[in-house]
Image (cartoon, rainbow, N blue to C red):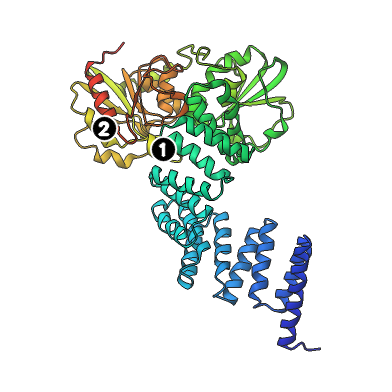
């Protein structure tokens, strides 16, 4: 029997009607089967393909959803809301440039489509094109000044360091909906960055009251408490760093093993994971002898770049490279992140373990680097001007090599660049004479060998500052106006590193004042 086209279309519509009934009943599987039947009989049924895409997306089948959304648009190019759905899937698939192109097409067809402007703002942010995100956010606010539009505007302004605009946008979102946990969380971080720590704590607590499992709100609250020296409550919040999606993805197996809380563990094995940056690991390995004193066998899992430096750490029975560990061995009884050890030991400002130095350079590495570091200058000074570019706050804590030019006129100093990467800046350092070592540094054991032969290290807040402090050598750390929590407030010293001196921005972005102060102190500096 031959089914005419009109009859096939009618059958397709009947299946689509059944799909909608299944959806209303919560039967997703039935709805998918009915929608699949609908587009089998009627391949150009754009609405059915769009709904099938929604159902596939609901069940995690992103590639299938992308395919159906694309076919829906092909069948009916004027179905502009589907462009937004397709863009959302493309962003989930890390195809942000394609998402941007799809949304731009939607806006050519429907210039006032609010959802497309919101999604375009998000796509620009996801792709790193943050300067382009502001215009669609502003347009979304013009079209529909609702909570979501203001939250997106706040995010776009934050990316451009327009913090006052970001604060105002999130406040407006809360005027429209005081239960928006995301806006409270955003304000908590924005208040932190502007030095308003009491307000940051209040906003973070409000976000958590509305959404108790809001991981980044807990972290914002932790930072604001810790930087004020409220370690007792700060550590309890900081453990939430373990629940961020990145950490869960990297260590999917740790949920099966109990968290160690400082109890005696003789006869058992404890896995200590270095789940944060290099600097955090260097800072926290000071606790390992105290951990060992409470029990059995310790396995320390760190990045490969740290393994040679940590090879002889006391209290470590096995050193692992975390990238090599896919599943947890059956005989590991307990686990704890390195960064959680201050909480485990109830650390306060008077009880920070500081057996400086607790890290040393390896003699053979020192000898290997000795010829490279020869100089007759009064001082041998190593510098680091930038941290990890993927760090959320890197644009505030890092400087340009050109900023060190203010120190170039000080006589009788041999300058050594310890920066890895960012080699493109070396050709623009003008009259500042620098011997760049970064390309020759293989790992942190090399860095330690270099530091051991310098008179001073001047660095932004990055791992080399921690390493110099852990080795007990003079180190000057340059801090932004709103520094990382560990540097506390209004002090030029660090309880974590007795040989460290802190130079702080007096106002946000004012590195010129920092370098002017460093220059004054450097002229009078005498090595130990």
Query: Image height check: is 107 above or below 275?
Result: below
Residue 416, x across and y down, in percent: 30, 27
The quarter of the image holding the N terminus is bottom right
Question: Which label's residue is closer to the chain start, 1 or 2?
Answer: 1
Q: Is residue 148 left or right of residue 417?
A: right
**Looking at the image, which is closer to me, 326 or 63?**
63
Real-space CA distance between mark 1 and mark 2, rounded to the nearest whole angstrom:
18 Å
Q: Residue at x 52, y 46 (%)?
A: 174
Helix, strand or loop at label 1? It is helix
Helix, strand or loop at label 2? It is helix
The quarter of the image holding the C terminus is top left
**Looking at the image, which is closer to me, 514 or 194?**
194
The part of the image, by quadrant, that contains residue 497 is top left
**Disc number at residue 394?**
1
Q: Are marks 1 and 2 in contact (CB under 8 Å)?
A: no
Query: Image height check: is 133 above or below 392?
Result: below
Residue that carries the numbered disc 2 in the rendered image: 512
The part of the image, by quadrant, that contains residue 503 is top left
**Disc number at residue 489?**
none
Query: Image height check: is 433 above or below 22?
Result: above
Q: Residue at x 63, y 36 (%)?
A: 251
Judge whether residue 391 can be spotted in this image: no
Q: Is residue 107 left or right of residue 269?
A: left
**Looking at the image, which is closer to me, 43 or 231?**
231
Q: Residues within 10 Å of mark 1 (few under 14, many from 20)?
A: some
Judge whether residue 271 can be spotted in this image: yes
Residue 247, x across and y down, in percent: 59, 37
Which residue in the rendered view is the most extreme toward the right?
A: 1
Q: Is residue 309 left or right of residue 404?
A: right
Residue 37, x across and y down, in percent: 75, 73
């Amino acid at each position: 029997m031959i089914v005419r086209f009109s009859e096939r279309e009618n059958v397709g519509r009947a299946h689509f009607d059944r799909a909608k009934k299944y959806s209303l009943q919560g039967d997703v599987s039935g709805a998918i089967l009915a929608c699949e039947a609908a587009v089998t009989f009627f391949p150009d049924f754009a609405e059915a393909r769009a709904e099938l895409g929604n159902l596939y997306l609901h069940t995690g089948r992103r590639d299938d959803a992308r395919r159906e959304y694309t076919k829906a648009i092909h069948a009916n190019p004027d179905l502009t809301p589907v462009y937004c759905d397709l863009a959302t899937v493309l962003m989930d698939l890390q195809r942000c440039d394609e998402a941007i192109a799809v949304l731009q097409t939607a806006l050519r067809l429907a210039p006032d489509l609010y959802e497309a402007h919101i999604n375009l703002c998000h796509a620009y942010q996801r792709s790193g094109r943050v300067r382009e995100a502001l215009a669609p956010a502003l347009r979304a606010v013009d079209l529909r000044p609702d909570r979501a539009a203001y939250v997106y505007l706040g995010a776009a302004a934050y990316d451009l360091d327009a913090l006052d605009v970001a604060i105002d946008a999130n406040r407006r979102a809360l005027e429209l909906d005081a239960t928006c946990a995301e806006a409270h969380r955003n304000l908590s971080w924005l208040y932190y960055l502007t030095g308003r720590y009491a307000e940051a704590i209040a906003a973070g607590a409000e976000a958590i009251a509305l959404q108790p499992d809001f991981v980044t709100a807990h972290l914002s609250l932790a930072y604001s408490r810790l930087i004020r020296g409220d370690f007792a409550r700060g550590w309890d919040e900081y453990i939430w760093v373990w629940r961020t999606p990145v950490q869960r993805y990297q260590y999917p197996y740790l949920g099966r093993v109990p968290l160690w809380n400082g109890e005696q563990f003789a006869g058992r094995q404890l896995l200590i994971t270095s789940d944060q940056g290099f600097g955090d690991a260097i800072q926290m390995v000071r606790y390992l002898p105290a951990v060992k004193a409470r029990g059995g066998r310790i396995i320390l899992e760190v990045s490969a770049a740290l393994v040679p430096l940590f090879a002889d750490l006391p209290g470590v029975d096995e050193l692992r490279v975390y990238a090599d560990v896919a599943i947890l061995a059956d005989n590991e009884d307990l686990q704890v992140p390195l960064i959680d050890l201050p909480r485990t030991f109830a650390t306060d400002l008077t009880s920070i373990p500081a057996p400086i130095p607790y890290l040393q350079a390896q003699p053979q590495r020192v000898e290997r680097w000795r010829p490279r570091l020869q100089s007759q200058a009064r001082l041998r000074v190593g510098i680091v001007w930038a941290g990890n570019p993927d760090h959320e706050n890197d644009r505030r804590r890092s400087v340009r090599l050109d900023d060190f030019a203010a120190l170039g006129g000080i006589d009788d100093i041999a300058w050594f660049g310890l920066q890895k990467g960012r080699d493109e800046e070396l050709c623009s350092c003008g009259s500042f004479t620098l011997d760049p070592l970064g390309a020759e540094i293989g790992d942190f054991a090399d860095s330690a060998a270099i530091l051991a032969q310098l008179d001073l290290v001047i660095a932004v807040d990055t791992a080399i500052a921690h390493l110099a402090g852990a080795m007990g050598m003079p180190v000057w750390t340059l801090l932004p106006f709103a520094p990382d929590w560990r540097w506390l407030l209004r002090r030029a010293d660090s309880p974590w590193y007795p040989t460290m001196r802190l130079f702080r921005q007096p106002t946000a972005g004012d590195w010129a004042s920092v370098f002017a102060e460093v220059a004054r102190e450097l002229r009078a500096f005498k090595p130990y």
